[in-house]
Amino acid sequence: MISDKMTAFVQGSSVIRAMFEEGKNMAKKYGQENVYDFSLGNPNVPAPASVNKAIKDIIDEEDSVFVHGYMSNSGYEDVRASIAASLNKRFGTGFAENNIIMTVGAAGGLNVILKTLLNPEDEVITFAPYFGEYRSYVGNYDGKLVVVSPDTDTFQPKFDEFEQKITAKTRAVIMNNPNNPTGVVYSEETLKKLAVIMEKKQKEYGTDIYLISDEPYRELVYDGVTVPYPTKYYKNTIVGYSYSKSLSLPGERIGYLVIPSEVSDYENVSAAANVATRILGFVNAPSLMQRVVGRCVDAEVNIEPYNRNRELLYNSLKEYGYECVKPQGAFYLFVKSPSEDETEFVNAAKKHHILVVPGTSFACPGYVRIAYCVAYDTIKNSLPGFKELAQEFGL
């Protein structure tokens, strides 16, 4: 018999993953070209040529025992130094290798830092709509996820509600920027407002409240939008990053945590994160991929295919009568369901072989998420179905 905690996790298992599996079954039945699967954020843009070259060169040039062997739990020193130098050059920060911990993707990094920080019943605040796995990650360590309700006009944080929900038990705040599922970017002004509130509450309760900024989509932004670097606005900020989206490496599970020297109790937090990496079973991030990102830390990210998809999908759906905020980043469109119960729309879409994810998965019912990190033809060929759906629902 499985544990009570896992029973709850299984019952609440990812709708996104379930729909992805359903899409594979539909493709077998109707043909891949006749199924329009917008469920999973699985990049369709190839990894940069420099990544594939680095893999080959490393295998040919470097000692295989070194490449495939253990290293410090926090990762190779030279790779961490390269990442720190790149961040400093791009964002005017002052990191060193000791501020970087290599992780098994952003998800691994989030679990490491939550394991590091949380005691049972500690509270972690996040802003809806949010990536649904946050609830599981916090629950892994017997914490409590506290959700700030969504502002469906702008999908920016509700500052008043946020301030009210911070308590003496608040240990961390998770911010996803650019946001999955909405694609909105939190501006410098937003970060400054969050920082003022959090500084005020730290003083009020005499506690440390850490801002955990989850940033796998940092490079995927459009129309000249920039994503401010959060450590510059709030001292107790820890950044989680992944190369899954920027370099199209989701299956390689490689990312890092930034733990600035300025965070409260830095020495213990950093040491504990290293131990958490080991005892969670990661031991260390994948060795070969560490060597690869060390060589490709400044590789150019190709956002043009995503932008092309974004423009076609957004403009077409708006023309058909759908309501949505134009995404500034990531590769998702968060669309208001033409039915108050979005599951009705999700099920109707399946009849047109279109797979979208219900907003309930992101604590925002009444919406659906469409991942446009797919082939351009997939979007183009799905449009007649979206148009027929709009007509069916009276848009």
Image (cartoon, helix red, strand yellow):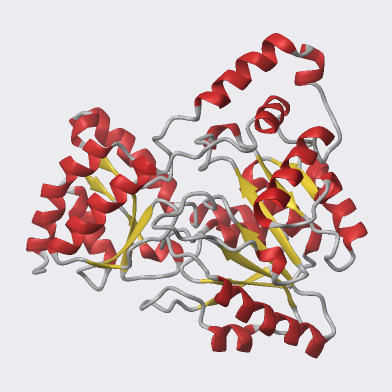
Image x and y of residue 211, in percent: 69, 68
The image quarter containing residue 105 is top right
Give x and y (percent) for residue 159: 55, 84
What residue is rendered at 49% in x and 57% in y?
12
**Relative side of 21 to 321, left or right:** right
Looking at the image, the residue that sits furthest to the top is: 60
Q: Quadrant of the C terminus?
A: bottom left
Tell me if residue 382 can be seen. yes
Residue at 61% x, 52% y is: 6
Residue at the far right in the pictured view: 267
Q: Is residue 124 above or below residue 332?
A: below
Determine whether, in the image, residue 193 is placed left or right of residue 278: left
The image shows a total of numbered marks equal to 0
Side (left or right) of 293 relative to 392: right
Residue 252, picture quadrant:
top right
Task: Indicate whether 99 appears above or below 114.
Answer: above
Q: State the residue in front, 265 or 346.
A: 265
For the point 53% across and 70% down, the residue is 187
Would residue 2 be visible to someone looking at this image? no
Q: Is residue 44 above or below residue 306?
A: above
Q: Position of residue 295 (x, y in %)?
A: 67, 29
Q: Position of residue 106 (x, y in %)?
A: 62, 48
Quarter holding residue 142: bottom right
